[in-house]
Image (cartoon, grey):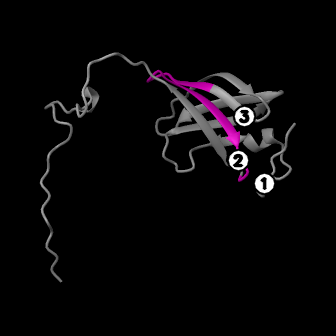
């Protein structure tokens, strides 16, 4: 078994260093994943932080350096492949692969995607900005 070599985790087996609940360093994602040791491998669970919906987790693999798994959010059917590797500072790096269905369509530059359009067909409300006059 390998050991993490860093100021924060020196001498801690990698498996133990990964144990816990992880979120993005910038806290800009709704996803959270929890890793725990189970027998000789890992148990992975995940959830949406805002509504608590659980991810369906499959294909969990530990290769001695990286923990990988597939996560699917049932309500959106959004599927990602996640590969976590521990960093020297004790944080994790995530290599994330997303899976989307694409279709062929004759589109041109500067055409606003349909999903972004408001019912009126405009991409955003038009507002006039006036210069503010500062009075001291």
| On-image quarter of the N terminus | top right
Residue 36, horizontal then vertical, whole percent: 73, 35
Judging by the rendered image, the residue that carries numbered circle 2 is 87
Judging by the rendered image, the residue that carries numbered circle 1 is 6
Circle 2 residues within 10 Å: few <14, some 14–19, many ≥20: few
| Mark 3 vs mark 2, CA separation in Å | 11 Å
Q: Are marks 2 and 1 in contact (CB under 8 Å)?
A: yes
Residue under the point 14% across and 46% down: 126
Relative to 86, 130 lies left or right: left
Could you say which disc has been placed on residue 66 in the image? 3
| On-image quarter of the C terminus | bottom left
Q: Give the secondary structure at mark 3.
A: strand
Q: Which residues are magenta?
A: 70-89
Give the quarter of the image for residue 111.
Answer: top left
Circle 3 residues within 10 Å: few <14, some 14–19, many ≥20: some
Q: Give the secondary structure at mark 2.
A: loop
Relative to 74, 43 lies left or right: right
Residue under the point 65% across and 26% down: 69
Give the quarter of the image for residue 71.
Answer: top right
Residue 24, horizontal then vertical, whole percent: 56, 45
Disc 3 or 2, which lies upstream in sequence? Answer: 3
């Amino acid at each position: 078994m390998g050991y993490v070599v860093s100021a924060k985790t020196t001498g801690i087996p990698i498996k133990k260093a990964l144990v816990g609940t992880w979120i993005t360093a910038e806290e800009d994602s709704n996803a959270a994943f929890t890793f725990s040791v189970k027998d000789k491998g890992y148990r992975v669970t995940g959830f949406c932080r805002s509504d608590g919906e659980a991810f369906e987790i499959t294909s969990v693999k530990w290769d001695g350096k990286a923990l990988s798994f597939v996560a699917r959010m049932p309500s959106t059917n959004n599927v990602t492949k996640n590969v976590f590797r521990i960093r020297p500072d004790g944080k994790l790096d995530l290599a994330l692969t997303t899976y989307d269905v694409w279709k062929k369509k004759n589109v041109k530059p500067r055409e606003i995607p349909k999903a972004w359009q408001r019912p009126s067909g405009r991409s955003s409300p038009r507002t006039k900005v006036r210069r503010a006059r500062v009075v001291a």
